[in-house]
Image: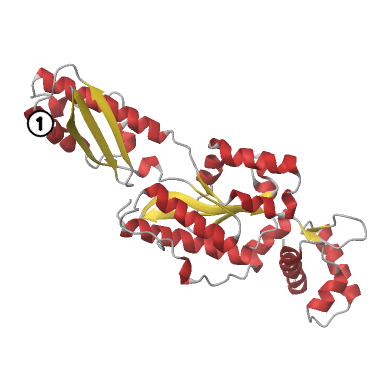
Amino acid sequence: MFLDERKQKILGAVVRDYVESVRPIGSEELVQRHDWGVKSATIRNELAELAELGYLKQPHTSSGRIPSDQGYRFYVDHLMIGHNISTKGRADHGIDNSALELDRILRLTCSMLTQYTSYTSVATPPRPTDTTLSHIFVTSAGDGRMLIVVLFSTGQVENRIINEPHPVTTSEIVILNNLLLAAYAGKTLQSMGLADDKDESTAGEQTLRVRSLFEMITNLVRQVVVSIEHNEQVVLEGTREMLRQPEFRDIEKLETILETFHGGPALFEILSKSVDSDVTVVIGQEHVFTAMQDCSIITAPYYAGASERGTIGVVGPTRMDYDRTVPAVHYFAQSLTQTLIRFGKA
């Protein structure tokens, strides 16, 4: 819906003043704080019209106005003033070559995003459909056991032990490593997880013993892949920031939101659907999950090269400082992308 210039100025001022003061904004206060050259009565009429149009709401009779979800949406889409982000907040700050685990990088980035925005930060791990197997390595673990090490393109490493009653010879281990490398290096998790793929062409010319071991290892790796594909864990930092927001002083409301945070699948689904080429902002009633309809979530995808990997963002009240937070989420997503490329994590 079209708003004339004056209404846009007033709506923008109400949003920014309410974010700062956390109290309803009235016409007298707007006249005092903003030099628009109009009287209080004119502003009062404009506020009433904005409320009728659904952009503002009045929490109490005779009180000022606060933005509605529709008002926040118009602000984000048309009126937001982005802040510049200090380069002191780079996502690779504090990361050295001895701490390159993906989970640690995500948590460090989320922690810095929370420090910058004062909102709870969230991130999803790399999307399994984009992940490939970099290497599968087999070695003897003694006493008839084999150690299977699976390295993924994200930098994630999984270890498994296979108990084999007959000790595996050094030559068999060499053959198995060569076969596994030829069969699976560079394969996506999706293709690796196909149950009807017996890979007989790869191990067909080997002895029955090697073929049996090869199939056993393949089945084990497939189990690892399935567990990763169904991993709906979300990296979450700064949960206590929710406690500092006046909107969440209602304990029951806060508990519902925190349950969504720590429940895993619900928040993972929200973040997975919040994907855009730049930044996605979901406000209040726009959420599918009722528990999150008092919140706004701002997310951005992070990448490895041209391949999308995951999502990072913040969760806070609808009374969010969008001017500061939207560019911050965008910046930290870009910085995370650069960090993952720099350390070869994706």
**Residue at (64%, 45%) from the top-left corner?**
287
Q: Is residue 333 visible?
A: yes
**Residue at (20%, 19%) from the top-left corner?**
164
Tell whether 315 sits left or right of 203. right
The image quarter in which residue 221 lies: top left
Number of callouts in the render? 1
| Kind of residue sitting beneath label 1 | Ile
**Residue at (63%, 67%) from the top-left corner?**
80
Where disc 1 sits, the SS reads helix
Q: Is residue 134 above or below residue 305?
A: above
The image quarter in which residue 93 lies: bottom left
Tell whether 146 sits left or right of 44. left
Camera-side residue of 303 and 264: 264
Camera-side residue of 193 and 180: 180
Tell whether 285 sits left or right of 236. right
Q: Which residue is mark 1?
A: 175
Q: Position of residue 5 (x, y in %)?
A: 73, 73
Q: Position of residue 337 (x, y in %)?
A: 39, 58
Q: Residues within 10 Å of mark 1 (few under 14, many from 20)?
A: some
Q: Position of residue 125 (x, y in %)?
A: 43, 45
Q: Position of residue 90 (x, y in %)?
A: 44, 65
Q: Quadrant of the N terminus?
A: bottom right
Q: Is residue 255 above or below residue 197?
A: below
Q: Residue furthest front?
A: 143
